[in-house]
Image: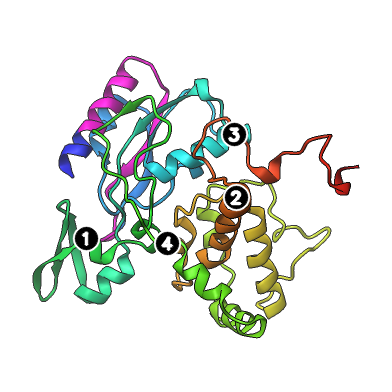
């Protein structure tokens, strides 16, 4: 992956030195193993800090709302789809963006990796199809495909859907991925079983809102869970409040979620919160034939209406 990082560094240095952009959003090495951290550089001299590897899981589109000036940004497939969302929702202007497209073959799930390598992982190096892992017990090589994030396993948009320049050539897209097997399993349950399933799913939630904070769709100036006048949701860990948060957040993402996995990746307790949003992703595809962020300029179905709609609700 060093080659990809070097290509990104060269592009970023050129854009900054030629004053094409004021800053570039990308990743740099993190301070703990298995985590590259988002960063913003404003000088070509800092371009060498930028990296790209299997630990760059955060969705960088999350950092665009509210940012002014001319912005360069590295974008994986899911990042680019959320950039399309931001363009549609007027969170950023296309003329202010320079998108450095980065093909992606999936991000490593640190929990899966630690379960295979042990919790004493000292360092890990993305070697393409394998991860070289250093532990206190020694070195090992783990096939990357065995430790991918769940959303990456079934991702069908590895290449950016919108870009100004590609860092490297596109990678083959995955075909015949069974994207909704987990949703189908929940749909096959009875209503009572589904209720129990989701109650158990969020039983450990501590309402830290890491899922919300990592989500590029959650950019409201004041989130409904933070409002106190009126107070829509209690501040305690009451089950009803926790349930309300997860269901309302999912509905806020309906027709907009790209299944980037940022929410699940950020959860400190490993709760598979994508199960809420992924059901709505499936419904949007089946009911409207719509995938969020894939076609620039096409608004989500729940964001549009026609004055001549034949249904009564519009009148």
Q: Which of marks 4 and 2 is nearer the N terminus?
A: 2
Q: Is mark 3 on a helix, strand or loop?
A: loop
Q: Which residue is the site of mark 2?
A: 218
User: CA separation, marks 4 and 1?
Assistant: 17 Å
Q: Which residue is the site of mark 1?
A: 144
Does residue 195 show up? yes
User: CA separation, marks 1 and 3?
Assistant: 34 Å
Rendered residue at 67%/73% (across/down): 243
Checking the image for residue 298, the label placed there is 3
User: CA separation, marks 1 and 2?
Assistant: 30 Å
User: Magenta residues?
Assistant: 7-34
Which part of the image, by quadrant, shows the C terminus?
Answer: top right
Residue 249 lies in what quarter of the image?
A: bottom right
Q: Which residue is the site of mark 4?
A: 265
Q: Which of marks 3 and 4 is nearer the N terminus?
A: 4
Q: Is mark 1 on a helix, strand or loop?
A: helix
Magenta-span inclusion, residue 13: yes
The colouring scheme, among rainbow, by chain, secondary structure or one colour, is: rainbow
Q: Which of marks 1 and 3 is in front?
A: 3
Q: Is mark 2 on a helix, strand or loop?
A: loop
Rendered residue at 22%/38% (across/down): 5
Q: Is 19 situated above or below 274? A: above
Q: Earlier in the sequence, mark 1 or mark 2?
A: 1
């Amino acid at each position: 992956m060093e080659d990809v990082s070097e290509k990104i560094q060269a592009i970023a240095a050129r854009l900054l030195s030629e004053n094409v952009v004021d800053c570039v959003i990308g990743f740099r090495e993190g301070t703990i193993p298995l985590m590259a951290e988002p960063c913003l550089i404003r000088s070509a001299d800092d371009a060498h800090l930028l990296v790209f590897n299997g630990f760059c899981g955060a969705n960088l589109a999350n950092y665009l709302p509210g940012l002014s000036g001319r912005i360069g940004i590295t974008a994986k497939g899911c990042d680019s789809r959320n950039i399309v969302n931001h363009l549609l929702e007027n969170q950023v202007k296309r003329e202010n963006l320079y998108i450095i497209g980065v093909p992606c073959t999936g991000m490593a799930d640190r929990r899966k990796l630690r379960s295979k390598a042990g919790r004493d992982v000292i360092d890990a190096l993305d070697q393409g199809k394998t991860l070289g892992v250093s532990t206190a017990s020694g070195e090992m090589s783990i096939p990357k495909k065995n430790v991918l994030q769940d959303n990456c396993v079934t991702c069908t948009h590895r290449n950016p859907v919108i870009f100004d320049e590609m860092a490297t050539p596109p990678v083959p897209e995955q075909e015949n991925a069974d994207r909704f097997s987990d949703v189908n399993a929940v749909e096959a349950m009875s209503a009572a079983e589904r209720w129990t399933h989701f109650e158990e799913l969020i039983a450990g939630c501590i309402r830290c809102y890491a899922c919300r904070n990592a989500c590029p769709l959650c950019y409201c100036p004041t989130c409904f869970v933070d409002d106190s006048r009126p107070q829509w949701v209690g501040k305690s860990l009451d089950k009803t409040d926790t349930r309300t948060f997860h269901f309302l957040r999912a509905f806020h993402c309906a027709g907009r979620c790209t299944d980037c996995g940022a929410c699940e990746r950020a959860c400190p307790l490993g709760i598979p919160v994508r199960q809420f949003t992924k059901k709505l992703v499936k419904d949007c595809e089946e009911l409207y034939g719509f995938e969020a962020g894939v076609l620039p300029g096409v608004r989500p179905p729940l964001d549009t209406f026609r004055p001549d709609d034949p249904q009564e609700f519009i009148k």
